[in-house]
Amino acid sequence: MKKIVIYCIVFATLTSFVLLQKEKPTLYIIGDSTVRNSNRPQCGWGEKIANFFDTAQLKISNQAMAGRSTRTFIKEKRWEKVMSTLKKGDYIIMQFGHNEGSKPDTNKAGYRGVLRGVGEETVELTWPDSSKEIVHTYGWYLRKFVNDAKAKGAIPVIASMIPRNQFVDGKVKRAGNDFGKWAAEVAASENISFIDLNKITADKYDLLGPDKVKDFFPGDHTHTNEAGATVNAASVIDGIKLLYQLGLNNYLLNKN
């Protein structure tokens, strides 16, 4: 009888160990077409990020979707889908800002727009079917992502939007006065990690110069090709390495 009990204990222990080994964390990524883009030759940095991680130890789930803003990512229940599988110990990097700029209303142009800033201001929209929608600020939507992730025991990270191919007086135009600034403010107020992807990449673009950078943007000033996506993915990794306490560093292939 004692032998049977011992065998059962050993079996249960080994089974638990195997299950725990299989339950590796997942890095979720949410954002827009600059993060995930199926319209080749365009490519998002989230599609290249796995090249920098040990995917035997960390899963990558790129849930970004072209054309989405913080508002529509929630409205279309894409965030709900992420939340349905997000678990304790997972990571989530969020990068939005390219599709938020229009005034929120019920026409095609305003469908994605949010209120500017990080405050609690709202506007109520009435759609043609008489349904109501409360639209919030960019910061409000980011805080929702952050607080929902925290409630699941996941580790949220905010990244500022990648810069566009827009040079002014030989320097890349930056987002430090609007969406980049607001992303940083939300991260600071929520005491979470922030990757200044806009600045990190813009610094690289400045060094490369407009003639080289234009090779990364085959169709417009916003969407990169695979080479540009790789540069931006490397910038994300540069930002992670600056966050010494962030556990994602443990899964990098090159920790130096």
Image: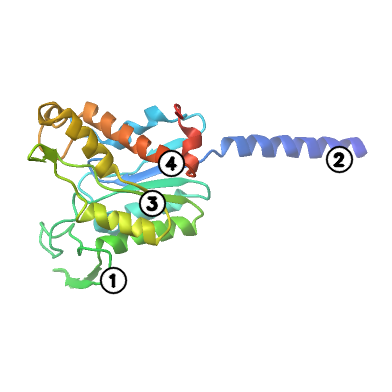
Determine which residue is flagged by label 2. 5
Q: Which mark is residue 14?
A: none
Measure the alpha-carbon separation of dots 4 and 1. Answer: 29 Å
What distance separates the C-alpha of mark 3 from that of mark 1?
Answer: 25 Å
Q: Earlier in the sequence, mark 2 or mark 1?
A: 2
Q: Residue at x 44, y 55 (%)?
A: 149
Amino acid type, residue under disc 3 in the picture? Lys
Image quarter where the N terminus lies is top right
Q: Residues within 10 Å of mark 4 (few under 14, many from 20)?
A: many
Q: Name the residue tied to disc 3.
A: 81
Residue type highlighted by circle 4: Leu
Q: Position of residue 208 (x, y in %)?
A: 18, 28
Residue 37 visible from this viewpoint:
no
Q: In the rendered view, does 197 fall on the left or right side of 166?
A: right
Q: Are marks 3 and 1 in contact (CB under 8 Å)?
A: no
State the SS at label 2.
helix
Q: Position of residue 148 (x, y in %)?
A: 42, 59
Observer-nearest of 21 and 4? 21
* Residue 42 in the image, given as x and y percentages of width and height: 19, 32
Q: Residues under labels 3 and 2: Cα distance?
A: 42 Å
Q: Which residue is mark 1?
A: 120
Q: Secondary structure at mark 3?
A: helix
217 up-or-down from 31: above or below: above
Q: Quadrant of the C terminus?
A: top left
Question: Pointer 4: what residue?
Answer: 27
Whichever of callouts 2 and 4 sits on the residue coming sooner in the sequence is 2
Q: Amino acid at mark 2?
A: Val
Residue 12 seen:
yes
Judged from the image, the secondary structure of the residue bearing numbered disc 4 is: strand
Amino acid identity at mark 1: Glu
Q: Earlier in the sequence, mark 3 or mark 4?
A: 4
The residue carrying pointer 3 sits among few (fewer than 14), some (14 to 19) or many (20 or more) residues within 10 Å by Cα, namely few
